[in-house]
Amino acid sequence: EQQVQQSPASLVLQEAENAELQCSFSIFTNQVQWFYQRPGGRLVSLLYNPSGTKQSGRLTSTTVIKERRSSLHISSSQITDSGTYLCAINYGNEKITFGAGTKLTIKP
Amino acid sequence: EAAVTQSPRNKVTVTGGNVTLSCRQTNSHNYMYWYRQDTGHGLRLIHYSYGAGNLQIGDVPDGYKATRTTQEDFFLLLELASPSQTSLYFCASSVDLDTQYFGPGTRLLVL
């Protein structure tokens, strides 16, 4: 059972456009993380956002726990933002479940 | 940034073969994890540990063993490798149940 859903599955934008990525989860949790996976595989932690809004540079994450969703906004996208963005939740113990990801492609 | 290394980076074995994947973190993190990543499934947790000598079962543990020999080292063992275990394997570590730091991954091909 897929407990973390991400949308869209893929997104193609022009450079400088803003990107909006969505994550929904089937249970209540207070631990939501966003990761970036570079083409070629290595994962990088972007934001740990248990609730509310968090910002890091051009990235803004908003998590609404009671609605079981989180979003990641990337402003003024750059070609180097291309890759896969993964949402992950902790569902009540030490395990973390990942979504399937959103593949973002930024074109010049 | 926390350092997590994995070895080997690539491995080819045959069905029934014995494989050990290694992971080391040098940041004294308590938690270490092994994941596999497959197209259509995303990242799935195999085993994890919260300290030396400790082992916890993840979501897809069948066919895998793991050992945490020290705070730094976490091993994943495939004693009778099968083609279904062909995958990209990631190790990660974290201080607590928050930010995870990932290794570069190991590509395993089981023929």
Image (spheres, rainbow, N blue to C red):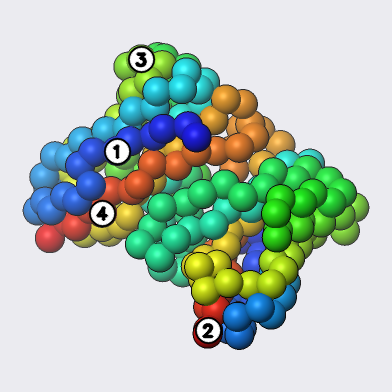
Q: SS at mark 4?
A: strand
Q: Amino acid at mark 1?
A: Gln
Query: How many residues crowd around disc 2 within 10 Å: few (fewer than 14), some, or many (20 or more)?
Result: some
Nearer mark to the viewer, of 1 and 4: 1
Q: Depth-wise, is mark 2 or mark 1 nearer the camera?
A: 2
| Percent of width and height locating residue A52 | 87, 49
Is residue B11 rendered to the left or right of residue B88?
left
Kindly identify the residue that appears in the image at 27 percent across and 33 percent down.
B22
Determine if marks 4 and 2 fall on one subunit.
no
Mark seen at residue A107: 2
Q: Residue at x 12, y 60 (%)?
A: B111
Query: Which numbered tag is attached to residue B70?
Result: 3
Residue corresponding to mark 4: B107
Between A2 and A108, the residue placed more toward the observer is A108
The crowd level at tag 3 (other Cα within 10 Å; few <14, some 14-19, many 20+) is few
For the residues labelled 4 and 3, the Cα–Cα distance comes to 24 Å
> Furthest-right residue in view?
A66
Counting residues from the N terminus, which is met first, the one under dot 4 or under dot 3? 3
Residue depth check, mark 4 versus mark 2: number of the one nearer the observer: 2
Location of residue B59 in the rendering, given as x and y in whole percent from the top left corner: 50, 44
Counting residues from the N terminus, which is met first, the one under dot 1 or under dot 4?
A: 1
Q: What is the chain identity of the residue bearing mark 4?
A: B
Q: Nearer the viewer, residue B61 or B40?
A: B40
**Residue at 79 percent of width and 49 percent of height:** A54
Spatial CA span between label 2 and label 1: 33 Å
